[in-house]
Amino acid sequence: MREHDFDFDTHETRPSQRRKARFDDEPMPSRRGRLTEEERVRLARAREDTHSEADLPPGGDRWSTWGDADHGPEPRPDWLITELAAVDRELGVLKTGKEADVHLLERAMPEDGRSVLMAAKRYRSGDHRLFHRDAGYLEGRRMRRSRENRAMTSRSSFGRNLIAEQWAVAEFAALGRLWLIGVPVPYPVQRSGTELLLEFLGEQDGSAAPRLAQLRPEPDELVDLWHQLVDALGMLASAGLAHGDLSAYNLLVHQGRLMLIDLPQIVDVVANPRGEEFLERDVRNIAAWFASRGLPGHLGDPEELIAQLREEASGR
């Protein structure tokens, strides 16, 4: 990703909270920590929604947040519901993780009965010690204001909130870019603060598509999935990118199609000093999984694939 992808306009500290600044026009972050302005607005709106539950139709948890969010790329899928009169309903947890939890959410139009299932990925608050692996991934993602950079480096409460929002922005931007060039990723519906709404990969009954790690593919299916993976990694490399944390746990198999998920740490192979290292690790990790399931060595040679992807990344 590029520097301008992560330029946040945060609010200033109130005079009563200011500490001695290093520069005349640059107040230091408060030790108490702060939310980013966008996240503060989102949380305030959530509290308002909680207090106005009586105004919601039966079974709804909130009104659609489409009107206040960043939107996914066009052309938008036919299944997408963008009316502001739609109602969101929480249906349960799909996955819990160290950095984020994923919930199943239904967005419905009470008037005509239309509805769609989506995955709501919510990065956790800065009250937790998160993003334990983020130092290498954040290379090349420096923010323009040194105050924010210092906060993220020190992992203050404010800094962790910035990191959470930065990763949400990074994943949403990456998904939009990859979806447009045909990489098999879920469609990114919207981003509001640290919440992403994504295309739900699963069945209408709410059953999520299985992770690759859960499957024991037959030999022919294994070969097909490997070829799908090579094609997907090739498209990433052609855009100068590597997944950054690829394993059988962040690949889904939906209706026979391999889908890449969990992309907040996507790496620019050229701009990031460790870009090639991440690309190589991705390939070795996933090639080892396929080999353990019986993929013939002449098909799943990691050295050959690494060389191929490096060449594609360098020739963009």
Image (cartoon, rainbow, N blue to C red):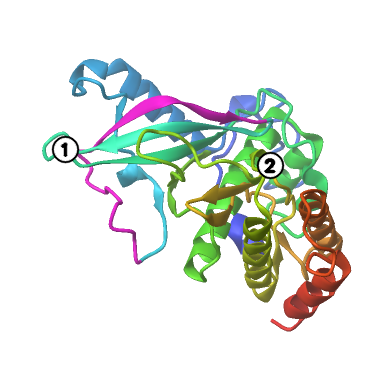
Apparent side of residue 221 relative to residue 73 in the rendered image (left or right):
right
Judge the density around disc 2: few (<14), some (14-19), many (≥20) Cα neighbours within 10 Å: some
Q: Which quarter of the picture shows residue 111?
A: top left
Secondary structure at badge 1 equals loop
Magenta span contains residue 78: yes
Where in the figure is residue 74, as x and y percent of width and height? Answer: 37, 65
Which label lies toward us, 2 or 1?
Answer: 2
Residue 266 or residue 125, whichever sits in front: 266
Q: Report which residue position mark 1 lands on.
A: 113
Residue 164 or residue 190, whichever sits in front: 190
Quarter placement of the C terminus? bottom right
Where in the figure is residue 275, as x and y percent of width and height? Answer: 81, 63
Instruction: Give the number of marks.
Output: 2
Magenta span contains residue 293: no
Residue at horizontal 21%, vertical 15%? 54
Judge the density around disc 1: few (<14), some (14-19), many (≥20) Cα neighbours within 10 Å: few
Q: Are marks 2 and 1 in contact (CB under 8 Å)?
A: no
Secondary structure at badge 2 equals helix
Where in the figure is residue 211, as x and y percent of width and height? Answer: 61, 42
Apparent side of residue 42 relative to residue 16 in the rendered image (left or right):
left
Apparent side of residue 252 relative to residue 294 in the rendered image (left or right):
left
**Span highlighted in magenta in the image:** 75-97
Residue at horizontal 77%, vertical 49%? 293
Residue 204 or residue 88, whichever sits in front: 204
**Residue type pointed to by label 2:** Ala
Where in the figure is residue 231, as x and y percent of width and height? Answer: 64, 70
> CA–CA distance between discs 2 and 1?
36 Å
Quarter placement of the N terminus? bottom right
